[in-house]
Amino acid sequence: TQLLEQSPQFLSIQEGENLTVYCNSSSVFSSLQWYRQEPGEGPVLLVTVVTGGEVKKLKRLTFQFGDARKDSSLHITAAQPGDTGLYLCAGARDSGANNLFFGTGTRLTVIP
Amino acid sequence: DTAVSQTPKYLVTQMGNDKSIKCEQNLGHDTMYWYKQDSKKFLKIMFSYNNKELIINETVPNRFSPKSPDKAHLNLHINSLELGDSAVYFCASSQARGITFGSGTRLTVV
């Protein structure tokens, strides 16, 4: 069972464009994380959001946790080729990271 | 300097063989994991160990046996390898919410 659905699955855009990736679930999570994975490497944690409605900014990346803590979005402003990668959301049911449920992934390609 | 290191990075083996993947973390984390990423890039937890004790064991065939000799190591042994075991296996560790992953072991069973 896929608990966390991400959309779109694939996204190819030109450098300088904006984009939004969505992570949706019917389950409530205590926190939600976003990771970026590059080929041949493991996922790298970008951010953790904990409070419903929370918005966090990381340079050109804006992360939002839904009010009901069931969904999240990642918005990238003025995308750059270095943003290319596989973006994964992951939800935690408890306060730790012992049992993270990963999303289906969004593969982003930013064309120079 | 590598935080979570796993070896080997690539492993090609025949069906029926037994193989091991080693993992070590130098972050002082209490919890270590094994994750499996399939060909569609879906990442799923297999095992979780906290201070050398097994706390999560997802629906994984008992051909897979993790071993944690100490808090910094979590090795994965796989018996009687099958074609469907081909995937990328990630070791990881955590102290709080965020997980630090190794760079993965690509296992190919032929």
Image: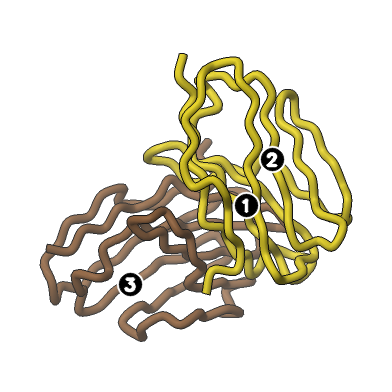
Residue B28 visible in the current orientation: no
Q: Colour of chain B?
A: brown
Q: Do the residues at pointers 3 and 1 share their chain?
A: no
Counting residues from the start of the chain, the first of labels 2 and 1 encountered is 2
Label number found at residue B77: 3
> Circle 1 is placed at which residue position?
A89
Q: Do the residues at pointers 3 and 2 share their chain?
A: no
Q: Colour of chain A?
A: yellow
Name the amino acid type tagged 3.
His
Q: Compared with residue B79, is residue A2 higher up or lower down, i.e. above or below?
A: above
Name the amino acid type tagged 2.
Leu
Distance between the Cα atoms at labels 3 and 1?
29 Å
Q: Nearer the viewer, mark 3 or mark 2?
A: 2
> Circle 2 is placed at which residue position?
A74
Cβ–Cβ under 8 Å for marks 2 and 1: yes
Q: Compared with residue B58, is residue A22 higher up or lower down, i.e. above or below?
A: above
**Residue B92 position within the rendered picture, expressed as x and y whole percent measured from the top left:** 53, 56
**Residue A61 position within the rendered picture, expressed as x and y whole percent measured from the top left:** 71, 31
The residue under the point 51% across, 50% down is A105
Name the amino acid type tagged 1.
Cys
Is residue B55 found left or right of A86 in the rendered image? right
- Label 2 secondary element: strand
